[in-house]
Amino acid sequence: MRGITGRFVVLIATAAVAPLLIYGVVSVRSLRSGTTQSVGAGNAAVATEIADRIHLYFQNNQRVLGSIASQLQGTQLAAWQQERTLRNHVLDYKEFLEITLFDRSGQVLATSRATSPRLAVPSPRTGGTGGLYIAQPRLDDDGLPTTTMALQISGATPGWIVAEISLEELWRAVDRIRVGDTGFAVLLDETGRIVAHGRADQKRLIASGATQTPEQKLASRLRSDGSRTSAGEIEGPAGAMLAVAARITVPDWTVIVEHPRKEALGVALALERQLVVAIGLALLATVGAGWLWGRSFIRRIVALTRVTRALAAGDMDARVHPRGKDEIRQLGDAFNTMADRLVELQEEIRKQERQAMFGRIAAGLVHDLSHPIQTIGNSCKLIQRIFDDAEYRATFRQTVERELATVKRVLDDLRNIARPMPLEHFSIDANATLAEAVETMTPLAETAGLTLRAELTREPAFIEGDLFALGRVHRNLILNAIQATAPGGLVVVATEATADRVQFRIYDTGCGIPEDRLAAIFDDFVTTKRRGLGLGLAISKKIVEQLGGRISVASEVGKGTTFVLDFPRAHAAALVQIAG
């Protein structure tokens, strides 16, 4: 009776049936209660997060209005200039449909509309806090929700700035919220009217302005309790729903997350059924048949577990040797088939990766080397005809040396990827090395029709680094910025210094880099250009890290890209400065 099977049979045979049944009932109730609490806590967290995001959405719009008001108050602008400023902000911020500036008496000072404004100063009865008033949402002519936000202005010229805000994006955001497979979110204003509804078949409630809904009752209970969240079970179109309401601070709206009870407790209900079945089968079958097949059953499971762990540890040759003709034998055969297929897939992936890498390298080498080789070949053909021309011989020598230098740089890049170059560490002036790179790249920027501007810190800033290697990084990043920026754009290079860090920033107003490609731009042979080896950023990253620094990038498509190089600051003055 030392084995698991023997002990299990003895335990079942000697134990009373009643304790097992009591244990089953307690387990079922505990499972259901625990699942309900867990689902409720998760939904409460989701509802609170949505409420915080909506609060932040209106807070950001409030800040934008405050910024516009400060801009108009802080400058002596004519009325037409103020209106142009308001129109520009309406164009820049798609949420704003109209912005109008009023004086203290409610007279219009400036508006973004070409005709008379549709907005007005809020009445004294309108609710609001801290000089901020948000009207009840309404549907515009297109059936999309809008609201009016008014911000009281204090200062030299007190008054109001009022904006009509489109809630379409907020509406769409609520539509995209899903809890589980069929759960959704509902957004209510302070009167209980539905602003947004996650179920497509219930959006008619938005236009109807219905307030006598289960969601409205739950929101009312939340307001009366004065708490941040409130949970309950309501009856919805799809049946019983587990609902959690969360209150938004500004505006005084409510978010309700609804999750169908069947789905929310689906796992618990399934486990309850499985538990009941398992208890019944255990009582009927374990005593009679457990000893007969239990030992072999458990032994084969242990063997399968052992081989599974070996495979997970990397032993791809591990296999199961199943016996018998039951489902465990089928499971063992399926496991062996899966392991064989994993080996095949692993080898196929290696082959595909090698082929893709070789193809990328070959294409890059053809692109980077074809032009210099063709130039050298053409020059050699030409010098055979006019070898006696001393002036052309000099030009020939310069051309060959220049193109051979290009070939050498490509080969050096390949070598440096496999084996990084040794770097010297001297105390160098961050401003000087960046200014030298700007001076070198300025003619190229002018040819491209761009503005290349340096913004250097006034105080001396030194770092420990290799002047030549760091200059190469600067020139590579500036060249990338120039190539990514259309004529008329701007490339800014800057230095910033703190007590213990020095940063280089290279910013451009170019096309930007898609978010899905940002994580891989520093990898070897990865490029956002049509051709080339894609080694520039990879080598730059290796150089920066060899010098004890960090390199990061932030980009937005259509607005530009910013590279940041961050190094520890050296407090000693520069000992050696090497020109070039």
Image: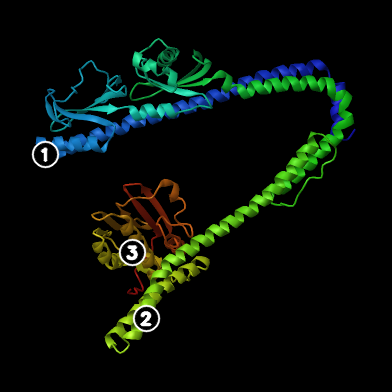
State which tag comes first along the sequence, 2 or 3: 2
Using the numbered discs, state the Cα–Cα distance from disc 2 to disc 3 in whole angstroms. 47 Å
- Identify the residue under disc 2: 381
Horizontal and vertical percent for residue 310? 73, 48
Seen as rendered, the residue at the extreme left is: 78
Q: Which of marks 2 and 3 is in front?
A: 2
Q: Which of marks 3 and 1 is in front?
A: 1
Horizontal and vertical percent for residue 92? 25, 38
Horizontal and vertical percent for residue 40? 53, 23
- Identify the residue under disc 3: 430
**Mark 2 touches mark 1? (CB < 8 Å):** no
Say what secondary structure mark 1 lies in. Answer: loop
* Above or below, comparing residue 310 to residue 8 in the picture: below
Q: What residue type is labelled 3?
A: Ala
Name the image quarter holding the C terminus: bottom left
Residue 136 or 569: which is nearer the viewer?
A: 136
* Above or below, comparing residue 212 to residue 272 in the picture: above
Residue ID at (45%, 26%): 47
Residue ID at (23%, 54%): 488
Q: Which amino acid does label 2 sit on?
A: Lys
- Identify the residue under disc 1: 77
Name the image quarter holding the N terminus: top right
Q: Which amino acid does label 1 sit on?
A: Leu
Say what secondary structure mark 3 lies in. Answer: helix
Say what secondary structure mark 2 lies in. Answer: helix
